Image: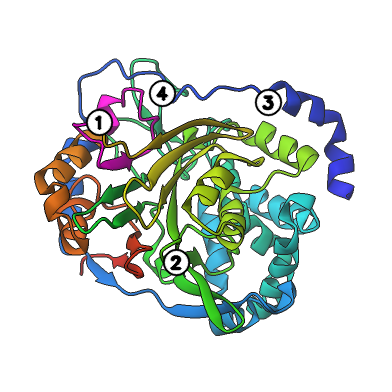
Amino acid sequence: MRVLQIIAPLITLATAHARYQCPHGKPAKTSEAGWLSNENLMDSNDDRTPKTPNRHIVNLDLAPKDRWTEIGKIYANQSDLIVQYFEDMLPHAAVVAIDKIAKHLVGYKGFGDFGEEMKGYSEALDLDLGYVVAANLVYQLESIGVNCSNWNNTGPTGQCGDDDEMVWLESDHYLRGLEDEVKTGYCTSVVAEEAGDGILHGRNLDWNLEEQLREFIITVDFQRGGETLYTGSTIVSFVGILNAMKAGDDGFSFSMDARCQGGKIWSNLLEALAFGAMTPCQHSRYVMETATNYDEAVHLFETGHLIDDGYFIVGGASPGQGAVVTRARNRDVDTWSIDSTDAEHGWYRLETNYDHDQPVPTADDRRTPGYENMEKIGKEALNEDNLLGEVMTQWPTFNPHTDLTCIMSAKYGIYDCSIWLDAR
């Protein structure tokens, strides 16, 4: 592949970072609560309204190039919004370069059939292939738009800037501090046992998309032989999945939260090109289409080469089937399962964007209020409605950056998602 030949001399550099350990940002030397106590942000969160995403079908029996054609044609007249997203996120020169380079990555071995899916999607959307490939690498590309270019922009980090200040990396090409408006994303996922011995799975995707692009978040029924294999959430032009649920007694659900702000972008991509790593969202499709039960799903999330670190939150259909799989790019760091011997929090597992056994920064402690809200409900009273109303839509789990909220359950076949529109 031409791109790989061009960057081959840099592969050694990428390999040198293979054992890179996520530091989760330097601890903030401040007692300030940052955005968590920002009343303006709290107020801006009021009166946001939910909307059910459009629902579509992807037929996995079709040739990969044809699977997204129908969906692409529906949104073709709005595909310029995807180009605008990159123009807003990145310097113009970077957008032009990425468009030219990304199209040559479509044959990258880590993409497998997804490369052909992207080609077909591009044609159906009437959108240059480079933009479609870039959209599928968006998590890897976001950090190009910030001054501290080693880090992706999902979540707060102390890695860049003054050691005495917790900073956020932004797509507006500069850093913001504790007193500034924060635009970066946060995610929260929780899997929990309920009294009926099922597992409920809540997920907030906090990407901070413009409202027009939030309308591009869709629910997709992935089918084989005319039957739905699983249902997932994705965004138009994106062939990976953000969260999904396979219904049934052997079914399972998953969501993904960012870890380590994605890691170091250049070593991630270079190593991926060398070893055929997958994006986490494409790997998630592989798991949903391969695993036949919860245990297999957890194992597959624990294994495989990934371009980025991440947290895979997995729920099954039976008691005890809930876990947070903490992943480095090339290994499983930790699998934290629901545990009946853990009297305090053992009936659920709640994950934000920090390893569960590490402290969170004062400026981004969404873990503590999340735990408190789960404990207020308790296992015996937990149901779909109060998981949504008393946990997933409570500050700061729910915040101005929340684009998508989903409640899932494999046992009960629940897949209820809402995108959030701005207050009018």
* Secondary structure type for disc 3: loop
Please, what is the three-letter code of the amino acid marked with disc 1?
Asp
The reply to whether dot 3 and dot 4 touch (C-beta < 8 Å) is: no
Dividing the picture into quadrants, the one containing residue 347 is top left
Colour style of the rendered protein structure = rainbow
Q: Earlier in the sequence, mark 3 or mark 4?
A: 3
Distance of label 2 from label 3 (alpha carbons): 35 Å
Distance of label 2 from label 1 (alpha carbons): 41 Å
Q: Is residue 342 visible?
A: yes
Distance of label 3 from label 1 (alpha carbons): 34 Å
Decide: few, some or many residues near mark 2? Use Cα within 10 Å; few <14, some 14-19, many ≥20.
some
* Secondary structure type for disc 4: loop
Q: Residue at point 34% right, 45% down?
A: 320
Span of residues in magenta? 342-364
**Residue carrying label 4:** 158
**Residue carrying label 1:** 342
Q: Earlier in the sequence, mark 2 or mark 1?
A: 2
